[in-house]
Image (spheres, rainbow, N blue to C red):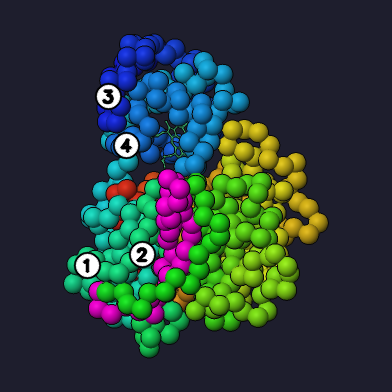
Amino acid sequence: MLFTFTSCTRSTSTAGNDAAAPQEQALSEADLDKARTNYVNYCGGCHGRELQTFVNRKWQHGASAKDLFKSIKFGHPQEGMPAYDTTFTDQEINLLVAYLRNGINSQKSLGNTPDLSKGAVYQSEEFRFRLDTVVTGLEVPWAMAFLPNGDMLITERSGTLYRFTQAKQLQKVAGTPEVLAQGQGGLLDIQLHPDFSKNQTLFLSYSAVKREGGQTLSTTAVMRARLQGNTLQDQKVIFEAQPYDRTRHHYGSRLAFGRDGFLYLTMGDRGGTKTNPQNLSVHAGKTHRIKEDGSIPADNPFVDQKDAMPSIFTYGNRNAQGMARNPETGEIWLHEHGPKGGDEVNIIRKGANYGWAEVTYGINYNGFKISDLQQKAGVTDPIKVWVPSIAPSGMAFVTGNRYKGWKGDLLVGSLSFRFLSRLKVNGNNIEGEERLLQDIGRVRDVRMAPDGYVYVAVESPGRIFRLVPVQE
Ligand code: HEC
């Protein structure tokens, strides 16, 4: 069988650039197979195994054959797109280009999540549950927080903070910080102060922007503010990672309060694999621990070390987009994205080194080894590794009595494989995994709400669901 594709795709940004592209090419089944294998192994983790991120796309760098070829060969390193010039021959790249164009045309309907308006019922190992659609009409909801009166706050990565009211209205909250909503950046996590009902204080993380010498730079920052009605007041930036960077990815940004009352935050490596995570004089590639006003706890591990950033709590971290306090032990757990393979769950302990990028279970996106080492003296081993990567985001421990058999387990979203993972926790060990809600969409956040239900935020189209066990 022959698969054909034409050069006439739905290019939006570079019409007219197609002149250099082949008019029509035939893909033999063998070529298609090769391209599919390369696509799944090298691209699917970030772009979706079924080309999800390419369907209905607003192309940044053009969709002509020539543009795609350039994107793949040279990458867009500042946006987090690796270069494949040392991995593939030009011919292999051309096959990938054909595979993309062919696939995108035949899969326009992908990217839609299943119709759940009637409340789909799912079977878990322990019980059946219904999926209620709570919020629709969002794009990329990055995080949720639940107010004492039952309203929900939702961050949209593009920069808006919403209040979703009991009356099911989405209202905008004013006074949010300026964000650089490019690549993985934007308005990111939200966390309420433990005494929110008394002080109405909350914390937002985001990619802050600085324009300098003709360049636009960004970094991860945390703002504290008071919520008065639908306005933020008394805004104060309590953390601003140094230095600012030209890249647009690996911002980390998850926030959690420890039992010690301090605010923990994850800071991604910003793409500086070699330069940042093992270097204590920069903020990137670490977790940090600060007081609620941004000052530094006196017993942070590196406060007395010259040239070390005093907010550092752990180092050798890559890009953690999920973090939560274990309600049993009080310790902070997080997961981090590995490169190609090697996503990890770690328990965060004062001063510990988690090894990135000297030690990893993953390999580089372009297929080359990052390190021969998976373990090393002085490096804390993860308690769970995913190979291949699931691209984890969001994290919550199951509490309360609604979910029989899940209590104490850890829920984690998967962006690339589009499911909700339930990790079976026993003490400080993970003893199994159940994959729920397969193909629900890119799961960005998961939280336990005060009403005792699990809420899950999914991207593009942005929706928020609630898991309701079915009584039998
Ligand atoms: C580490 C994650 C990652 C991997 C692996 C990856 N990409 Fe990308 N890619 C990105 C990011 C991030 C962008 C920037 C645009 C965006 O934010 O989606 C991008 C952009 C692109 C673009 C340009 C899109 C546009 O809007 O113009 C193309 C084409 C592309 N990738 C193809 C591929 C192919 C083919 C592979 C496999 C050989 C691949 N990518 C592997 C992350 C990745």
Of 417 and 212, the residue lying toward us = 212
Residue 444: tell me if it is visible.
no
Q: Residues within 10 Å of mark 4 (few under 14, many from 20)?
A: some
Number of numbered discs on residues? 4
* Residue at image mark 1: 171
Residue 369 is situated, as x and y percent measured from the top left of the image, at 68, 37
| Residue 362 position (above or below residue 431) | above
User: Disc 3 marks which amino acid?
Assistant: Ala
Which-is-in-front pick, marks 3 and 1?
3
Chief secondary structure of the magenta span?
strand
Whole-Å distance between the Cαs marked 3 and 4? Answer: 15 Å
Alpha-carbon neighbours of circle 2 within 10 Å: few (<14), some, or many (≥20)? many
The disc at residue 15 is 3
Cα distance between the residues tagged 4 and 1: 27 Å
Which residue position holds label 4? 57
The x, y position of residue 428, in whole percent, is: 65, 68
- The reply to whether callout 3 and callout 1 are in contact (CB within 8 Å) is no
The answer as to whether callout 4 falls within 8 Å of ligand 1 is: yes
